[in-house]
Amino acid sequence: MRYYFAPVAPHRIMFKKLRILILLFILATVGLGAWRANARITAWDNTVHVAIYPIAGDNSPASARFVAELNNESFAEIGEWLQGESNKYGKTVLQPVAIRVAPPLLEKPPMPPPSASALDAILWSLKLRWWASRHDTIAGPRPAVRLFVLFHDPDLTPAVPHSVGLDKGQVGIVHAYASRLQRRQNAVVIAHEMLHTFGASDKYDLGTLQPLYPQGYAEPQRQPRLPQVLAEIMGGRIAIDEHAAEMPERLQETVIGTETAREIGLLKTR
Ligand SMILES: [Zn+2]
């Protein structure tokens, strides 16, 4: 038998259709699961269990030592801060998040593709969620949110890559510093990514890193408007003037603004 054009065997077409169908089914299941989980996380009526998986971000002995010494106490201020902020919005749940630290992981999670198409991003997030489910070494209640935190030696890595918290995906990859001096600023970065997994969006200009007005400002009504003295947690920085903004040094210098509060279920009314 001879073909005059490059044929595709019928069973291969079937197989391709089947693959697409399976992929669609997985996406629908994952989407539904994420939506249900997000509804539970943002109800603010029960403690949300958050797991932190520390990972040494490089081969430096300092990073390994730092990671080995972390415990629940190391991240306690994130829980205390969220308790205070949720109280401001009238929520009375005791301990809205319980953060627990897993034993350090020796493997790094799959990193996000540098400039991803929407499909690449979806596939990466599936891969990350799958990886996360297979690297769960934490004791106690099953965590609703998993944050993989890579700690880098500041002497080796003066500027760490961008952290990623999957919007409504309940997983995040956070880059932090293996340094006691940076502990409080690490808490700001971890809280920011954690709130992404609750459904909060970024409120800063991705090009200039300037907080967006008004949603990225802690006190948009402040007179004069600039300089601000606090940061909105998803705005990321304290706006000093039109072109400069500073990283807050600790969580006590950040607040949850009204738009973020709406996105994560703390505020229902418009
Ligand atoms: Zn962000």
Image (cartoon, rainbow, N blue to C red):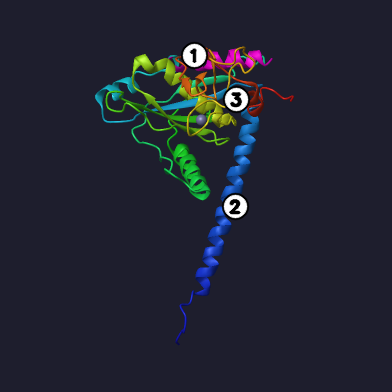
Q: Position of residue 238 (x, y in %)?
A: 51, 18
Q: Which residue is mark 2?
A: 25
Q: Residue at x 58, y 58 (%)?
A: 21
Q: Tell me which corner region of the image, top left, top right, bottom left or bottom right, holds residue 155.
A: top left
Q: Position of residue 125 (x, y in %)?
A: 50, 42
**Relative to residue 34, is residue 139 depicted above or below?**
above
Front one among 46 and 59: 59
Q: How many marks?
A: 3
Magenta region: 74-90
The secondary element bearing badge 2 is classed as helix
**Relative to residue 248, is residue 270 depicted above or below?**
below
Under mark 3, the amino acid is Tyr
Any mark on residue 77, and which? 1
Which of disc 3 and disc 2 is earlier in sequence? 2
Any mark on residue 213, and which? 3
Q: What is the CA distance from the residue labelled 3 to the residue labelled 1?
A: 27 Å
Principal secondary structure, stretch drawn in magenta: helix
Which dot, 3 or 1, sits closer to the camera?
3
